[in-house]
Image (cartoon, rainbow, N blue to C red):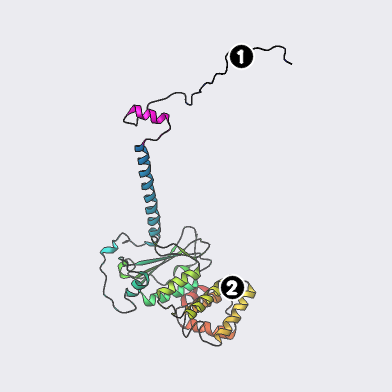
């Protein structure tokens, strides 16, 4: 119980507290009265809102241009890189192996004189199958081949710098070539390929890149069963032979030996992508010396073709 009570002398009074210490007129508005009113109500001037939207659009376009330039910077490595490809005259077709008709059919018409393929690979895991496919592409097209070392790699063995063969004497005139093949030794978890930075996302994995390059040869089997069989061998090579354990590799060797006992090649009457990929994975796994007889005979047949010479050179 209180000792004494005192009646309130002020009553119930509500006081609106200020939200800011002081106010200044809006110097950006043409009409100071309207600007001050908009500032007090927390509104944004329409002119400022339009300016912000325009700035956002400009920044978005700048980021897109920067991404495109960064991608092109990895593909353009010659002194005449700033050459306007649309002004280069196209020469006449010499033969089916050197004309651009096949590339135009496979990839669509392009106003440029050169289509660039850029592959990033780790030097500890050289993509042997891609070297074989590069040799086949050189047989069919005029290919500008270059090898570079990324700053993420301190040094690479000399054979890796020449794995695509000697530098062409006309490498500084890009308009002489139909296809650019650039191999960059880089610290990447998986082998990557970039073909068109504008319309195509990067391709990851040696098997997927091998499929893309093989299709440029226009040698893909038209029979769906044969194409599926070749794809199955490609998956088996990478997932079991290259990445599997000793038991899985032994199982793949037995399957290869059985298939090669009935046919000289894995998926048809001639060399295919299945043979290229499987042979390279067997060689890279170190299982060639202990392979069954049919597999060793098949490896010898691959070696005799000549396209595997650079892959064998890296294994020595």
The N terminus sits in image quarter: top right
**In the displayed structure, would residue 163 be above or below residue 50?**
below
Please report the residue visible at 38 percent of the width from the left and 28 percent of the height from the top.
36
Counting from the top left corner in percent of width and height, residue 179 is at: 36, 70
Q: Residue at x 35, y 44 (%)?
A: 54
Disc 2 on helix, strand or loop? helix
Which numbered circle lies on residue 8? 1
Label 1, secondary structure: give it.
loop
Image vertical order of residue 72 relative to residue 243, above or below: above
**Residue 122 appears at what percent x and percent y?**
51, 64
Residue topped by disc 2 = 240
Q: Residue at x 41, y 34 (%)?
A: 43
Give the extent of the magenta segment: 25-45
Residue drawn where x is 35% and y is 73% of the image: 105
Please say whether residue 39 is one of the residues in the magenta stretch: yes
Disc 2 versus disc 1: nearer the observer: 1
Q: Which residue occupies the foreground of this view, 135 or 215?
A: 215
């Amino acid at each position: 119980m209180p000792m004494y009570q005192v009646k309130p002398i002020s009553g119930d009074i509500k006081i609106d507290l200020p939200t800011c210490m002081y106010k200044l007129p809006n110097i950006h508005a043409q009409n100071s009265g309207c600007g001050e009113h908009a500032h007090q109500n927390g509104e944004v001037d329409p002119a400022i809102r339009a300016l912000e939207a325009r700035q956002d659009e400009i920044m978005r376009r700048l980021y897109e241009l920067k991404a495109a330039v960064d991608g092109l910077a990895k593909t353009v490595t010659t002194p005449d890189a700033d050459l306007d490809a649309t002004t280069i005259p196209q020469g006449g077709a010499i033969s089916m192996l050197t004309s651009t008709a096949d590339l135009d059919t496979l990839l669509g018409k392009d106003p440029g004189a050169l289509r660039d393929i850029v592959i990033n690979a780790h030097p500890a895991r050289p993509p042997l199958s891609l070297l074989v496919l590069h040799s086949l592409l050189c047989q069919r097209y005029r290919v500008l081949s270059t090898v570079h070392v990324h700053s993420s790699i301190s040094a690479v063995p000399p054979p890796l710098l020449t794995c695509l063969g000697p530098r062409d004497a006309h490498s500084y005139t890009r308009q002489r070539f139909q296809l650019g093949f650039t191999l960059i030794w880089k610290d990447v978890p998986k082998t990557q390929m970039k073909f068109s930075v504008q319309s195509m996302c990067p391709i990851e994995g040696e098997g997927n890149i091998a499929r893309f390059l093989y299709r440029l040869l226009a040698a893909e089997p038209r029979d769906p069963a044969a194409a599926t069989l070749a794809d199955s061998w490609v998956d088996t090579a990478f997932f079991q032979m290259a990445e599997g354990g000793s038991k899985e590799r032994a199982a793949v060797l037995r399957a290869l030996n059985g298939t090669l006992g009935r046919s000289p090649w894995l998926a048809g009457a001639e060399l295919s992508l299945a043979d290229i990929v499987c042979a390279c994975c067997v060689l890279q796994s170190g299982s060639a010396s202990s392979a069954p007889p049919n597999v060793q005979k098949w490896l010898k047949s691959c070696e005799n073709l000549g396209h595997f010479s650079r892959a064998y050179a890296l294994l020595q």
